């Protein structure tokens, strides 16, 4: 019995040590807030995460993330883990503030304008921020995924993101889509599925098969229209998952969607080396279909 108790103690110690190793491998990076826009008394910030070995004499590829919330609510911290992870992979990352209805009484068109201005700020201040303006990726979830796509077609600028990382995005704001009642009869101005052009960035879309905001048939139609326009569009389907699955427990969906983005960026030459997400957060198993 004594030997048995000793064995339990040793096993527990080993397990605790293993957990500590995993925790030590997770890279934590603090953000810096940069004012990119002020509307009356409302100040909007880019929250920047830089690699721990950041060198201001170098130029880095970048990602700008946009939180969701139906254009009604939400917070830049929604993409904090993704920002820290991709900063640990050598990119400079940003998560943005933008105006939302519940706080500012604004519309999806105001949110679209803010996302556009945030992206334009990065382009205009690329040298100061040590980023390569030709290699800025934009990503987002739900309404934030919608806003990410609008940076590729809305506004007067001809410069486009290098790629789009879309987590269950709103792709259709028309009568059969999401948010049509708030479109003021102008849905085609900001509806991604109605604005697929020849210069659309390579895109990855991750969505659960039970998502009601972005039904799978809509995602497949978007992919088909992208490919008809000669553009790259990867669709990753998560079996049985509902809207915003990637941001909820269990953590394996955060891990897998982040890994899918990492692999996609590797293929586009926008990130170097192998993914380290499982080294930082642990192994996982999920059921996905890649189209």
Image (tube, rainbow, N blue to C red):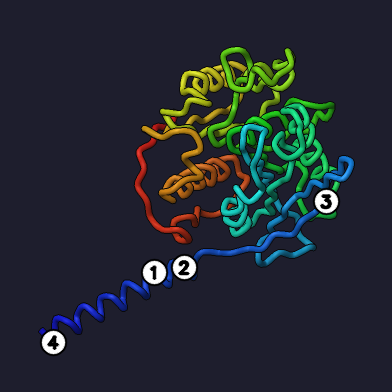
* Label 1 or label 3, whichever comes before in sequence order: 1
Q: Residue at x 59, y 40 (%)?
A: 268
Where does label 3 land, which residue? 35
Residue 163 numbered tag = none
Q: Secondary structure at mark 4?
A: helix
User: Residue 181 occupies which quadrant of the picture?
Assistant: top right
Q: Residue at x 56, y 45 (%)?
A: 266
Q: Residue furthest bottom?
A: 2
> In the image, is residue 204 above or below residue 231?
below
The quarter in which the C terminus is drawn is top left
Which tag is nearer the camera, tag 4 or tag 2?
Answer: 4
Q: Residue at x 31, y 76 (%)?
A: 14
Q: Secondary structure at mark 2?
A: helix
Which tag is nearer the camera, tag 1 or tag 3?
Answer: 3
Q: Position of residue 104 (x, y in %)?
A: 77, 37
For marks 2 and 3, give the CA distance: 33 Å
User: Residue 192 occupies which quadrant of the picture?
Assistant: top right
Where does label 4 land, which residue? 2
Q: Is residue 159 left or right of residue 286?
A: right
The quarter in which the N terminus is drawn is bottom left
């Amino acid at each position: 019995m004594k030997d048995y108790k000793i064995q339990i103690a040793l096993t527990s110690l080993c397990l605790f040590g293993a957990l500590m190793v995993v925790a030590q491998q997770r890279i934590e990076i603090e953000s810096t807030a940069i004012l990119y826009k002020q509307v009356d008394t409302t100040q909007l910030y880019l929250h920047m995460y830089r690699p721990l070995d950041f060198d201001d004499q170098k130029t880095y590829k970048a990602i700008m993330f946009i939180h969701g919330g139906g254009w009604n609510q939400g917070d830049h911290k929604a993409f904090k883990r993704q920002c820290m992870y991709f900063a640990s992979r050598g990119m400079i990352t940003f998560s943005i503030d933008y105006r939302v209805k519940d706080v500012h009484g604004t519309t999806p068109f105001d949110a679209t304008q803010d996302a556009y201005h945030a992206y334009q700020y990065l382009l205009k201040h690329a040298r100061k921020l040590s980023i390569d303006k030709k290699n800025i990726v934009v990503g987002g979830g739900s309404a934030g995924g919608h806003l990410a796509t609008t940076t590729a077609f809305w506004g007067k600028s001809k410069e486009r993101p290098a790629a789009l990382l879309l987590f269950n995005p709103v792709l259709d704001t028309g009568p059969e889509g999401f948010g049509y009642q708030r479109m003021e009869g102008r849905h085609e101005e900001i509806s991604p599925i109605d604005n697929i052009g020849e210069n659309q960035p390579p895109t990855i879309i991750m969505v659960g098969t039970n998502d009601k905001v972005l039904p799978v048939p809509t995602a497949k139609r978007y992919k088909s229209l992208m490919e008809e326009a000669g553009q790259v569009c990867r669709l990753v389907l998560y079996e049985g998952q509902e809207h915003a699955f990637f941001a909820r427990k269990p953590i394996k969906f955060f891990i897998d969607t982040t890994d899918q983005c990492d692999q996609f960026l590797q293929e586009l030459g926008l990130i170097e080396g192998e993914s380290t997400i499982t080294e930082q957060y642990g192994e996982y198993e999920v059921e996905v279909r890649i189209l």
